[in-house]
Image (tube, helix red, strand yellow):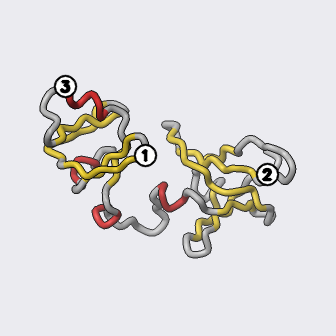
């Protein structure tokens, strides 16, 4: 969120509909982004944009160093533990302040299971990330 106003062009999504918009200016404000969008010139007009999702082309996003990952690259990856047990698939990521958390949708056959929350702590709980094979290995008990 710190850099979102640096990236252009922007797309906004509301109710599943994406549209291109022209960003005039923007900045992070607390846990939100405050932006001025061309064509939305007063607070009443801008009110309809509150809560919209923001997307930018991946070509705008800087390349990461080895061992760094964008959340979008992790969502959908399979997760297994060091014992070789498949735990599920990364459903989403959570920001908690101290560290991010993998939300792993469990794959328990025949019953609905709550997702597992695994701290994103590299070399402690997350022992390997292989984007090519689509697999994250964790040091985490399957029953935890």
Comparing marks 2 and 3, which lies closer to the viewer? 3
Choose the circle earlier in sequence order: 2 or 3: 3
Q: Quarter of the image containing the N terminus?
A: top left
Q: Secondary structure at mark 2?
A: loop
Q: Nearer the viewer, mark 1 or mark 3?
A: 1
Are the residues tagged 2 and 3 within 8 Å (C-beta)? Answer: no
Residue to which mark 2 is pinned:
141
Q: Residue at x 52, y 37 (%)?
A: 96
| Crowd rating for badge 1 (residues with CA inside 10 Å; few <14, some 14–19, many 20+) | few
x%, y% of residue 14?
Answer: 38, 41
Where residue 110 appears, as percent x and y from the top left, is 87, 50
Residue sitting at 62 percent across and 54 percent down? 90
Distance from the alpha carbon under mark 2 to that under mark 1: 37 Å
**Residue receiving disc 3:** 43
Q: Is residue 72 left or right of residue 42?
A: right
Q: Earlier in the sequence, mark 1 or mark 3?
A: 1
CA distance for labels 1 and 3: 23 Å
Q: Which quadrant does the C terminus fall into?
A: top right
> Is 97 placed left or right of 37 in the picture?
right
Q: How far apart, in angstroms, are the residues tagged by discs 2 and 3?
A: 50 Å
Estimate the x, y position of residue 46 in percent, counting from the top left: 23, 31
Kind of element beneath mark 3 = helix
Rendered location of residue 142, percent (x, y)? 80, 52
The residue where tag 1 is placed is 16
Which residue is at a point 74% across and 50% down the rendered structure image?
Answer: 106
Instruction: State which quadrant residue 49 falls in.
Output: top left
Q: Is residue 116 above or below residue 50?
A: below
* Residue at figure coordinates x 54%, y 47% from the top left: 93
Label 2 close to label 1 by CB (< 8 Å):
no
View extreme (bottom): residue? 132
């Amino acid at each position: 969120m710190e850099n979102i106003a640096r990236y252009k062009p922007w797309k906004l999504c509301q109710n599943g509909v994406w549209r291109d918009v022209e960003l005039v200016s923007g900045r992070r404000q607390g846990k939100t982004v405050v932006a001025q969008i061309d064509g939305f010139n007063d607070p009443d007009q801008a009110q309809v944009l509150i809560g919209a999702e923001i997307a930018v082309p991946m070509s705008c996003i800087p390349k990461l160093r080895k061992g760094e990952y964008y959340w979008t690259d992790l969502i959908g990856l399979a997760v297994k533990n060091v014992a070789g047990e498949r735990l599920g698939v990364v459903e989403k990521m959570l920001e908690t302040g101290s560290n991010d958390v993998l939300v792993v949708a469990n794959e328990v056959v025949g019953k609905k299971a709550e997702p597992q929350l695994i701290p994103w702590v590299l070399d402690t709980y997350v022992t390997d990330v292989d984007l090519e094979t689509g697999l994250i290995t964790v040091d985490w008990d399957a029953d935890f």
